Each structure stands twice: as C-alpha cells, then as structure tokens.
C-alpha cells in the first residue's frame, strides 16, 4: 500500500519513500487498475499508515477508530452506546420479556389440562383417529 | 421486513453522502440501530407458522435466528474494517461499506424468501460482492486464485440446483416454501430422480462445505480481508445449511438411503479437517478448517432429518457463526500488528496483550464446545441424532469432538502461552475498538445460554 502513495512523488515525506528490502513490483501501480501487483511485505515495525510513530504518541487516549481525536472519541461513544447500551441491554431486556416463545409453555399447560380432563372422564388420553371419522365422506365403489 | 430492509438499503446512500471524517461512526451507529430493529423478528407467537408475512418475504422459527445473526454482523464488520481501510481513499472505503451492505441486503432477502427461486437468486447474488471483496481487498496474490475457486465451486454446484428447481416447479406447480411441505409427495423412482435429488442438494453441500468439495473455503477465508472472512464464516456457510433444511422436505423418501454417503463424508470430514488443524502454521487457515469441521457436523445433523438433528444444526450454525467470526477478528488483531498470519511469529501474546488473551480464551473455549455454551448444545443434539441413525457414528463424532478440543487448545496455547519471541518488540496495545468488537461477538453468545429457545427452530 505504501507504494501507492509514492505516486504523489516528492510530496511524500522522505521517511515513507525509503524502499523496503523486498520489492516485487517494478512499476508505479496506476490507480486505474487498482493494485493487483504484489506490494512489498511490511517490516514489522512499520504499521500501515503510521510510519514509525505509534498513534498513542499524538493521542494518548487513542481508541483505535480514527487518527482525529474528536472523531475517535465520538466513534467510541457511539459504538459503545448503540452496541452495548441499546443493542445488548435494551435489546436483551426486550428479548427477555418476550411472551412464551413458540408457544412452548402454553403447549405444556394445555397438555396437562387435557390430560387431567381425559383422566377425569375416563377417556383414553389421545384418540386413535386424527380426524373425526364421521366427517370423512368416502366415494362408494360404483361411483367414479 | 421493510422496517429492517429499507434502513439497510438507505445505508448505501448514507455512506456516499456522509462527510469523510464521520463516515465510520455514522455507518456504525446506523447499522447498530438496524441490528436492534431486527430483534423484533424474534417475536414468535405461533407454534410452527410464519410471521411477518408479505407476498415475497416471511420469517419463521428457522430463518429468524439467521436473519438476526446477519443483521448483527454488519456493525461488527464495520468495526473490524475501520483500521485496515484507513489508508485508502475515502471513496474506496465507501465502496467497501457499500459492498458489505449489499451483502446484508441479499442475505436478508435470501433468508426471508418465501419462494425457492428467490432464495436461489439471492444465494447466487451474494457471490458477487464477496468476489469483489476477496479479490480487490485481499492482501496477497493468492487472493485471485481464491476468488476463482470460490466462484466456480459454488457456481458448479448451483447450476444443477437451478435445473432441479425448474423441474420441481414443473411437477409440483409451485415453489412457495409455505406450501411445499404440504404438496403431494413426488414419485421418485428412476435414476433420473436420484440425479435430481443430488442436484437439489449439491449446491448447498458445496456451500456448507461438505468435506470433498470444501477446497474453496480455506482459500477464500484466508485471502479475504477480515470483514470478508467474518461474513463468509458467520453467515454465508449457513446459507447452505438453511437451503438444505428448506429443500429436504420435498426430497423424501430418497433421502433415507441416498444421504448415507454424504453423512459419511461429512463425519469423515470432521475428523480429517480437525486433524489438518492440528498441523496448521497459518492461523486463519486453522480457523477456516475449523469451520469446515463444525459444518460437517451440521451437514450430518440435517441429513438425519430428525427434529433433534435440525434443532442441533440450527443451534450449532448460530453459535459457530458468532464464534468463528470472533476468532477471525482475533486473528486480524494479530495480523494488523505483525502483518503475518504465521502463528509462530506471534506467540506468547499473553505477556504483551493480556486483555486480548481473555477474549482469545473465551473464543477458544466456545470453539471447543464448552458447556453451557450453545456450541456444545448444538453438537450434543447432532451427535445424539446421528447415534440414533447409526451407532457407529459415535466413534467418528467422539473422535471428532476430541480433535476439536485439541486444536482449539493448540490455537490458544500457540498464540497466547509460552515466551514471547525475541523479534516482537513493539506491539500496539489493544485498542478499545478491538475490545468492543470482541465483546459484541461473545456477549450475545453468552446471552444465548440464558434463552436458548430463540434458536431451537421448529422443535417444542
């Protein structure tokens, strides 16, 4: 990625323009094609966009969002507010108080009620037929 | 559906109209609000039926957890991508966010689709933004090969699916997911019918992926930038699982016999990919193979076609989505500091970054399916369902669980424990952003322990 910046020519500070040890691409990559040329592997000390300076030097309260301290602070606040306070806490409370998900507790209560009813009346707990056999109309052998 | 879909669509003009300084905070807040709105889909008052019905979209107990996971993932992807795209021109950053948002739109339409062809079109549509993300924003030359494998494996699997679906439409008359379970059973006797059966499933098996057609996954996951890896691991693999669970209702009774080789492949894959994980030097590759391993269990669970199999599959899909995405984010925190994925280069990080070790620990424990996390519950239900299908599977799933625990522990010990290598001199301390990212991954996973019925699917 640093090689892409080199197309700005002498405007680039000298720090960034020192060629690193392993340089595969020989041509200046043009912006039109995007960067399909393999750029050099970064030495571990040079972080992308930071040259050799850690962002904590300029901004001791760096949160990892942006190099601009005001935007960094606000991004952090928005992230935590909407992520934790709204989504997890308020969302979590909403989910906790959802009624009987999938009607499982209702199903249990209904089953117990029906079982008690059937046992009191001496009926079998569940009938053999799913549908009422009186309501099924069958065609006779002679009809089409 | 529209209360989530329209804000998501409007996120695209928002990214292009916001001032460059405020691009990332704005999109983050916007996507988090969408995620909160998506929680309303979890209201499920009916036993088995559909909610939020419209002519083209609906939700039911199967699609709702996946939809919420999709919506939750966009803000996480935005959080994860903020740093590595910071050096790019702002319009390219906007393009990146637009691609992620369009992926979200396609995924919402896919999981909410009431008609199988719509699901198919959205299934294919997610390939395009993903291809662009992998091949344009990946970091190594291998990304081009990865994109090719990704695209053509999926396409080769899904073209038979298109033909199969059109045949199904011809014979049944409809492809509405709402009524397909109640259609007359198909007469499936000939050899052609068996090929049709395979055609219906092949696309989803490639997507899951089933061991044997899984080669695209390690390439795509490794070469993709962090947001690409996250969405691939967390949601796109589950598109395959979801598709299988929907289509399998019309595939009776062939599935009882024909699923045999696929279940065996899946379980063998669990063991083989687990063993490969133990020999990996590349961190992202280890996590990618771990995904294949977990999804192998999911495939096995779905193909047994029992209520516990389906429920276990859904639970494991959601839990694995959150865990795998968390692991990729952790791998990215390493990558941003050392620009290398080799585990040996960044060891003993507990000494340097102890707070991140907490997240590594929880994510590794989730990956090895520690109770009471839903990862274990899903795995147990699938293992039970497979045991019911055949006692011999217990050997494979048992060894698979053992190997899973081994490589998860291996990953944790390699990256966190031991002495710090001498060349690791100056690592940035862990950023608040990274902690927030990990918290937003793992806290929902922990919260799911408290209300697991949200992800049980159709079972009572």
Image: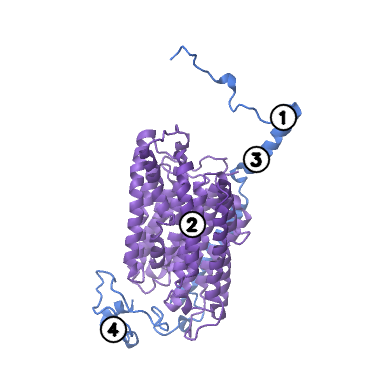
Q: Which callout, 3 or 1, points to the residue nearer the camera? A: 1
Q: Which callout, 2 or 4, points to the residue nearer the camera? A: 2
Which residue in the protein does label 1 denote? Answer: A118
Q: Are marks 3 and 4 in contact (CB under 8 Å)?
A: no
Chain assignment, label 1: A
Secondary element at image label 2: helix
Which residue in the protein does label 3 denote? Answer: A106
Q: How many marks?
A: 4
Disc 1 packing (10 Å; few <14; some 14–19; many ≥20):
some
For the question of whether residue B409 can be seen, the reply is yes
Residue B226 x %, y %? 43, 67
Whether marks 3 and 4 lie on the same chain: yes
Disc 3 packing (10 Å; few <14; some 14–19; many ≥20):
few
Secondary element at image label 1: helix
The chain drawn blue is chain what?
Answer: A
Q: Colour of chain B?
A: purple
Chain assignment, label 3: A
Residue A19 x %, y %? 31, 85
Query: Residue at point 41% right, 64% down?
Result: B218
Residue located farthest toward the right when viewing the structure as drawn: A120
Give the CA distance from mark 3 to mark 1: 18 Å
Nearer to us in this view, B366 or B285: B285
């Amino acid at each position: 990625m640093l090689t892409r910046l080199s197309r700005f020519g002498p405007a680039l500070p000298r720090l960034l323009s020192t060629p690193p040890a392993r340089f595969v691409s020989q041509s200046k990559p043009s912006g039109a094609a995007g960067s399909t040329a393999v750029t050099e592997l970064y030495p571990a000390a040079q972080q992308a966009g930071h040259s050799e300076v850690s962002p904590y030097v300029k901004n001791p309260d760096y949160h990892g969002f942006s190099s601009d301290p005001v935007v960094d602070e606000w991004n952090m606040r928005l992230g935590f507010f909407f992520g934790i306070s709204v989504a997890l806490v308020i969302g979590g409370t909403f989910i906790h108080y959802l009624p009987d998900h999938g009607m499982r507790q209702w199903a249990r209560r209904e089953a117990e009620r029906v079982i008690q009813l059937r046992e009191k009346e001496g009926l079998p707990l569940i009938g053999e037929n799913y549908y009422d056999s009186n309501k099924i109309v069958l065609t006779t052998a002679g009809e089409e | 559906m529209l209360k989530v879909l329209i804000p998501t669509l409007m996120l695209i003009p928002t990214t292009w109209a916001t001032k460059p300084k405020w691009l990332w905070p704005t999109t983050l807040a916007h996507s988090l609000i969408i995620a909160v709105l998506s929680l309303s889909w979890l209201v499920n008052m009916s036993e088995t039926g559909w909610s939020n019905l419209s002519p083209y979209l609906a939700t039911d107990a199967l699609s709702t957890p996946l939809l919420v996971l999709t919506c939750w993932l966009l803000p996480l992807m935005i959080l994860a991508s903020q740093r590595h795209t910071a050096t790019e021109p702002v319009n390219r950053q906007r393009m990146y966010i637009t691609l992620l948002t369009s992926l979200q739109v396609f995924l919402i339409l896919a999981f909410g689709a009431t008609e199988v062809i719509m699901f198919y079109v959205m299934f294919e549509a997610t390939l395009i933004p993903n291809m662009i993300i992998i091949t344009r924003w990946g970091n190594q030359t291998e990304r081009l090969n990865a994109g090719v494998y990704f695209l053509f494996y999926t396409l080769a699997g899904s073209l038979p699916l298109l033909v199969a679906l059109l045949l199904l439409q011809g014979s049944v008359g409809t492809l509405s997911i709402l009524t397909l379970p109640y259609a007359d059973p198909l007469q499936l006797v000939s050899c052609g019918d068996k090929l049709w059966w395979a055609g219906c499933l092949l696309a989803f098996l490639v997507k899951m992926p089933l061991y044997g057609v899984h080669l695209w996954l390690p390439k795509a996951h490794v070469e993709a930038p962090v947001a690409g890896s996250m969405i691939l691991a967390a949601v796109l693999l589950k598109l395959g699982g979801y598709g299988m669970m929907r289509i399998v209702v019309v595939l009776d009774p062939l599935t009882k016999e024909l699923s045999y080789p696929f279940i065996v492949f899946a379980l063998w894959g669990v063991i083989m990919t687990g063993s490969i994980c133990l020999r990996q030097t590349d961190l992202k590759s280890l996590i990618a193979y771990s995904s294949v391993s977990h999804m192998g269990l999911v495939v096995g669970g779905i193909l047994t076609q029992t209520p516990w199999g389906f429920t276990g599959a859904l639970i494991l899909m959601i839990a694995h989505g959150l865990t795998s995405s968390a692991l990729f984010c952790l791998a990215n925190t390493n990558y941003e500091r050392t620009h290398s994925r080799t585990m040996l280069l960044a060891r003993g990080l507990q000494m340097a970054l102890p707070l991140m070790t907490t997240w590594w620990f929880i994510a590794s424990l989730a990956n090895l399916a520690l109770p009471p996390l839903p990862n274990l519950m899903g795995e147990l239900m699938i293992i039970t369902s497979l045991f019911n299908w055949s006692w011999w599977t217990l050997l494979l799933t048992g060894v698979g669980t053992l190997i899973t625990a081994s490589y998860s522990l291996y990953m944790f010990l390699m990256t966190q424990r031991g002495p710090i290598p001498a060349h690791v001199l100056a690592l940035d301390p862990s950023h608040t952003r990274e902690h927030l990212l990990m918290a937003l991954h793992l806290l929902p996973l922990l919260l799911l322990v408290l209300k697991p019925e949200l992800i049980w699917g159709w079972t009572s």
